[in-house]
Amino acid sequence: MCLRGNRRKSNAATQKVIYDLLDALPDSQISEMASFIMSIKMRDKGRLHKDLEAASLASADFWDNDIGDEVWNNT
């Protein structure tokens, strides 16, 4: 049962396959799978944070200028 090979599967069908796989696991392995899923979510969240940080650093030079600083100081 390979999910990567069949990209035509709908999201609902994929969720059902995952649910069935989890349902077949013994109770002793459920918490391990939950930890694995959470680690994937945290990894993706970390990537998003890094992307946002890189974007903000790329635009930092735009805001670092004497004219803008002087205008801001006088408001």
Image: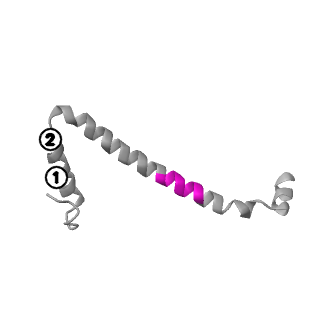
Q: Give the quadrant of residue 3.
A: bottom left
At a point 55% along the width and 56% down the height, the residue shown is 52
Which amino acid type is shown beneath numbered disc 2?
A: Asp
Q: Position of residue 28 (x, y in %)?
A: 19, 31
Q: Position of residue 68 (x, y in %)?
A: 81, 61
The span shown in magenta is: 47-54
Q: Is residue 62 left or right of residue 19?
A: right
At a point 14% along the width and 41% down the height, the residue shown is 23
**In magenta stretch: residue 22:** no
Q: Tell which residue pokes out farthest to the top in this image.
A: 28
Crowdedness of circle 2 by 10 Å Cα count: few (<14), some, many (20+)?
Answer: few
Element under disc 1: helix
Tell me if residue 74 comes above or below residue 33 in the rendering: below
Q: Which mark is residue 17?
A: 1
Tell me if residue 13 comes above or below residue 26 in the rendering: below
Q: Position of residue 6 (x, y in %)?
A: 19, 66
Residue 53, can we see it?
yes
At a point 53% along the width and 57% down the height, the residue shown is 51
Which amino acid type is shown beneath numbered disc 1?
A: Val
Q: Which mark is residue 23?
A: 2
First in residue order: circle 1 vs circle 2: 1
